[in-house]
Image: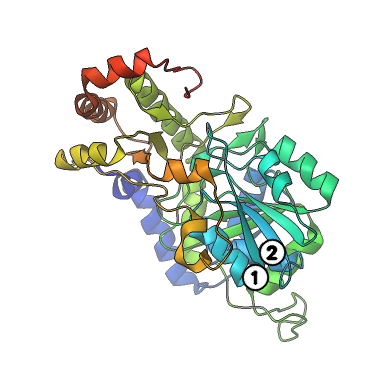
Amino acid sequence: MIPFVDIVGLHLDLRPQLDEVWSEIVGSGYFIGGPFVERFENEWADYCETRYCIGVSSGTAALKLALVALGIGSGDEVILPANTFIATAAAVVAAEARPVFVDVDPATLLITADSILSAISPRTAAVIVVHLYGQPANMDAISAVASATGISVIEDAAQAHGATWNGRKAGSLSVAGCFSFYPGKNLGAFGDAGAVVTSDYTLAEKVRALSNHGRRHDEPYRHDLVGGNHRLDALQAAILSIKLAHLDAWNNARRGVAAHYAQGLSGLPVELVAIDPRASSSHHLGVVQSAKRDELRRALRAEQIATGVHYPIPCHRQLPFLAEPMQSLPVAERAAGRLLSLPMFPHLTHAQIDRVVAIVRRTLGVADLVEQTAAGWCNDCARH
């Protein structure tokens, strides 16, 4: 059996440290906030090359709190890609703003500056840029559009821990970067957890207050804002600190897995999601596109190989958003029927990857390969 992600295997080498920190927390009595949370916040801010980090309860909470702290709410519109997990859109709704979905680039499946520009209206207050699958979007072009139009940029970096754009870390490329530390992420906790990173002091203080019932640091029972309970548990923070020391090595291993997949799938009628040369992807997911997606998935399942689909229904086609005027976003809609996420985790072996590739080759068949080659398949750009 080859799992989609092997969380248990990832923790085997860390077990002594994890056991030790659990005992330390039990003995300390710090379960909410305190030194473990402060330490991780400082470490994550440094890692992301930002001045501040506010640990919160989830990635969804991070997005909502960033929006609210920026003053975005009722009557405002927030642009976001249709090809994302629904949490991105749900956070906009939770902030009482209106999500406006746009199409994505056919090669990278990421939001683009052009798609943002075409959707800007007098009510547009912000854009949430989703660094999907681990690859940052083109933040140079997007930042230029945002600067020219006066809208805020927020990064949904839930899948991009440690990824870079032009050498700069995901999360540091906008006014606020929002992360999820869900257990299956590149940097995962032992439950739900998240963070907002920023270099804006005022924004950081507002997010921190909103995450903790609107409290002030200096007067904990004075509440200048109506906030909520979105705090980061000390246990999750301590675990994240332990795992952060290994994140770069794990990401490098993921890049090796992605390269091995690319080599093995070369020449086959499957489209690899393109990686912009200015980006360094963290390869949270190993995504391909195929017209025979469902057939491939059945064949892999029959061999006890787990796969995923990220995502089978674009956000603008999800039930909560069908009341909006029907949009045609052809790239996201086409991709939804073709996307397949292959097993991807740092200690996936070459033998396991070769087994996955062999089943893909067998399922697609030589005839498909000949037909696709005749049609002019280009491996270098991963498009026709």
At a point 19% along the width and 25% down the height, the residue shown is 362
Q: Which element is circle 1 on?
A: loop
Is any part of residue 192 visible from this angle? yes
User: Looking at this rendering, what residue extends furthest in the bottom direction?
Assistant: 221
At a point 84% along the width and 45% down the height, the residue shown is 148
The dot on residue 95 is: 1
What amino acid does circle 2 point to?
A: Leu
Please say if the residues under marks 2 and 1 sit with CB atoms less than 8 Å apart: yes
- Left/right placement of residue 21 relative to residue 92 reads left
The dot on residue 199 is: none
Is any part of residue 245 visible from this angle? no
Task: Please state which of residues 73 and 320 is positioned toward the viewer in this rendering.
Answer: 320
Task: Please state which of residues 123 and 36 is positioned toward the viewer in this rendering.
Answer: 123
At a point 62% along the width and 65% down the height, the residue shown is 92
Q: Residues within 10 Å of mark 2 (few under 14, many from 20)?
A: many
Percent x, y of residue 104: 57, 41
Percent x, y of residue 48: 64, 45
Q: Which element is circle 2 on?
A: helix
* Distance (Cα) linking label 2 and label 1: 7 Å
How is this picture coloured? Answer: rainbow
Q: Which residue is mark 2?
A: 67
Q: Upstream in the sequence, badge 2 or badge 1?
A: 2
User: Looking at this rendering, what residue extends furthest in the left direction?
Assistant: 302
Task: Please state which of residues 161 and 337 is positioned toward the viewer in this rendering.
Answer: 337
At a point 60% along the width and 71% down the height, the residue shown is 94
What amino acid does circle 1 point to?
A: Ala
